[in-house]
Image: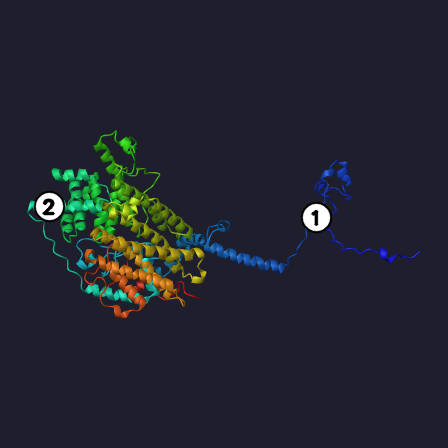
């Protein structure tokens, strides 16, 4: 009878106490009757609801002190108040999930009419921050009421040489400015001048020197009385037009045009206006400096206000050449913008925006069943419409202005040009340009909106542009596979493609500049955008240096796109120089691109206009940036009048007293962009 202590077993730790259950089952609680706590309870057994008898686990209650609740409530109230002031009229739930760029866009839309407008109305008129903005970034220090320009022929030579879109205006009139957006050159030059004030001073000094010694206009002789000599000149200009200009905008029926000219029987104003404009543009392609003035004077007699009272295809084509090409050559881009707008209305009035149901054929086989003259006339209408569309789109790339319904798929259905023969390279080129301009039209429309372009939108547009380029046949991309007559049209297409990609990328960089985003705050996507912009700019400079041809039409446009591309390495050097540890690779690459560009400008000089100042602008800014004060001698073009260069959009104004304060706001902004913290 001994107690066996070995029989005592080691027990494991007791499990945690089960969670407390309600004393009443869920069914009795629902019916509000007494429950005896059984499993099942007697009540559920009586009513034959045993399968529903269950006991709900009690939830643990966390008591919150009144002081904590009051503190959290006050913090929530303050944050809600801030959100309501930033986004008036926008429910907070709608802001959930939006990116930073999307929130900034909503903030801008909401703040302009209510907050900013009220704030600006209470400021004095001469407050520099009241400056109206040509777009989100391109502030120019003046109100809408002050916008005006004068591009008439009656200006003094020093005024005719410059304009607010195509060049830095050296006139003393500080109000010669029109509405421009963030895609303009003025925006990127402003960023350069903010980061490098010496560049601003250097350009101003050059501008004064040029304005003090302008080129006097050459006398324009009247047309010779010798009819045979005159006809010989005209025939030569017509040949140059169809050789160098027609492949770019093939809206004329060459055979029909030459036949009408040879007969010499037509005297209707529309035909005479078109004939004189063709000779005017052709004389420029031929290299003549004065002949275009003579024929332009003749064309003006047929392209006056009365010409809009008699609509016809020939007068419309003359307006296309006038507003799409010649007025830009004369440094009258706002006049050109207005003329193309009027031409667009004339085209719609002629019904060119709609495809007739009787002419919905788009193949050579089907077209062969119709009379050749009828097919040619219908095809000419199509090509005229798309040539007008392309001219207007190309000229508006760097304006930042609304598209004004240039193309609306819901109301316009004109088919793309058809290939009349298997080797109809002109139609193939125009079709490619039209597809490109349809994308550019959407890009321009997006830039004209109030909210800023987002990175995702820019990347999507860029991918669409690259897909368009890779889809082109080799005949439009490769010099080895392209006929000689398509040389200028092919290279224009390449330059425009690279230029619109540059505009997309550099505009995002300017947004960052305007927002004073530090380098450490840049996302991976933003850094990639900056790098892509540098690569595209280098590719544009390389391609222009490699493929430009000694022809005034080609050089005129190539030099303009080359100037656009130079702005990116200039800005890149300024940015890297402002950092404590600049990237040697980036600086070396940018400087190499600029040196190549300046060498190309120098080679182009014999075929450039006397008023072209693009090389001087690039050289002046580059020398100021790298601190080479001793380089103040000759720049690529020493001779010339007071205009910098045609076909780049700038709205800086230089007068007897340079009022930079009214143009460059935020003067204290030095090196904020991408500066190391």
> Could you tell whether 463 is left or right of 7 in the image?
left
Give coordinates of residue 92: x percent, y percent.
50, 51
Give coordinates of residue 630: x percent, y percent.
26, 70
Residue to which mark 1 is pinned? 57
| Mark 1 crowdedness (10 Å alpha carbons): few <14, some 14-19, many ≥20 | few
Q: Residue at x 58, y 60 (%)?
A: 71
Q: Earlier in the sequence, mark 1 or mark 2?
A: 1
> Could you tell whether 508 is left or right of 161 in the image?
right
Q: Residue furthest bottom?
A: 630
> 636 or 21, which lies in front?
636
> Could you tell whether 358 is left or right of 260 in the image?
right
For the N terminus, the quadrant is bottom right
| Mark 2 crowdedness (10 Å alpha carbons): few <14, some 14-19, many ≥20 | few
> 248 or 200, which lies in front?
248
Q: Is residue 142 visible?
A: no
Provide the secondary structure element on which disc 1 rests. loop
Q: Which disc is residue 232 wearing? A: 2
Q: How many marks?
A: 2
Q: CA distance from mark 1 to mark 2?
A: 105 Å
Give coordinates of residue 470: x percent, y percent.
35, 46
> Could you tell whether 236 is left or right of 436 in the image?
left
Render colour scheme: rainbow
Q: Quadrant of residue 545?
A: bottom left
Q: Is residue 237 visible?
A: yes
Q: Residue at x 27, y 66 (%)?
A: 202
């Amino acid at each position: 009878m001994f107690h066996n202590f070995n029989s005592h077993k080691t027990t494991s730790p007791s499990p945690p106490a089960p969670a407390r259950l309600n004393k009443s089952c869920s069914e009795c609680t629902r019916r509000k009757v007494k429950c005896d706590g059984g499993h099942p309870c007697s009540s559920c057994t009586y009513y034959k609801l045993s399968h529903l008898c269950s006991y709900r686990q009690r939830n643990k209650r966390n008591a919150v002190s009144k002081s904590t609740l009051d503190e959290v409530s006050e913090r929530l109230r303050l944050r809600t108040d801030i959100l309501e002031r930033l986004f008036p009229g926008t429910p907070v739930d709608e802001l959930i999930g939006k990116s930073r760029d999307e929130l900034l866009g909503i903030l801008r839309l909401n703040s302009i009419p209510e907050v900013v407008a009220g704030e600006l109305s209470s400021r004095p008129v001469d407050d520099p921050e009241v400056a109206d903005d040509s777009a989100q970034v391109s502030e120019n220090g003046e109100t809408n009421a002050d916008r005006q320009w004068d591009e008439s022929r009656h200006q003094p030579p020093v005024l005719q040489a410059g304009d607010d879109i195509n060049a830095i205006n050296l006139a003393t009139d500080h109000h010669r400015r029109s509405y421009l957006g963030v895609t303009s050159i003025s925006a990127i030059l402003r960023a350069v001048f903010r980061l490098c004030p010496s560049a601003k001073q250097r350009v101003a000094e050059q501008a004064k020197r040029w304005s003090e010694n302008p080129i006097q206009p050459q006398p324009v002789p009247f047309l010779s009385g010798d009819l045979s000599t005159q006809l010989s000149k005209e025939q030569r200009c017509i040949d140059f037009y169809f050789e160098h200009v027609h492949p770019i905008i093939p809206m004329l029926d060459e055979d029909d045009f030459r036949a009408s000219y040879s007969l010499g029987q037509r005297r209707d104003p529309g035909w005479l206006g078109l004939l004189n404009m063709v000779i005017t543009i052709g004389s420029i392609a031929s290299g003549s400096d004065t002949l275009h003035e003579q024929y332009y004077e003749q064309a003006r007699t047929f392209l006056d206000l009365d010409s809009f009272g008699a609509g016809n295809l020939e007068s419309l084509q003359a307006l296309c050449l006038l507003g799409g090409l010649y007025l830009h050559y004369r440094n009258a881009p706002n006049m050109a913008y207005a003329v193309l707008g009027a031409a667009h209305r004339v085209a719609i009035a002629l019904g060119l925006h709609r495809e007739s149901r009787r002419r919905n054929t788009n193949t050579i086989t089907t077209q062969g069943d119709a009379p050749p003259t009828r097919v040619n006339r219908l095809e000419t209408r199509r090509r005229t419409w798309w040539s007008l569309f392309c001219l207007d789109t190309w000229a508006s790339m760097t304006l930042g202005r609304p598209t004004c319904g240039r193309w609306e798929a819901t109301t316009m259905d004109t088919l793309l040009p058809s290939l009349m023969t298997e080797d109809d390279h002109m139609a193939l080129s125009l079709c490619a340009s039209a597809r490109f301009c349809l994308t550019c039209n959407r890009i321009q429309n997006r830039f004209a909106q109030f909210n800023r372009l987002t990175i995702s939108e820019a990347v999507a547009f860029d991918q669409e542009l690259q897909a368009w380029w890779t889809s082109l046949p080799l005949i439009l991309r490769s010099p080895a596979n392209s006929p000689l007559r398509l040389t200028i049209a092919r290279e224009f297409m390449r330059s425009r493609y690279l230029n619109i990609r540059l505009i997309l990328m550099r505009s995002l960089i300017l947004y960052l500049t305007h927002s004073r985003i530090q380098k450490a705050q840049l996302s991976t996507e933003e850094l990639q955008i900056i790098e892509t912009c540098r690569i595209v700019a280098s590719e544009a400079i390389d391609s222009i240096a490699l493929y430009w041809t000694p022809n005034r039409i080609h050089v005129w446009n190539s030099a303009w796109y080359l100037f656009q591309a130079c702005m990116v390495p200039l800005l890149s050097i300024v940015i890297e120089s402002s950092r404590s540890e600049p990237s040697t690779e980036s600086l070396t690459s940018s400087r190499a691109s600029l040196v190549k560009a300046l060498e190309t400008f120098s080679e182009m000089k014999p075929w450039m206009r006397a008023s072209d100042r693009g090389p001087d602008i690039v050289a002046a800014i580059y020398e100021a940036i790298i601190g080479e004060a001793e380089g103040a001698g000759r720049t690529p073009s020493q001779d010339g009048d007071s205009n910098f260069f045609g076909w780049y959009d700038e709205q800086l104004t230089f007068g007897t007293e340079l009022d930079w304060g009214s143009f460059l706001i935020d003067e204290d902004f030095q090196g904020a962009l991408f500066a190391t913290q």
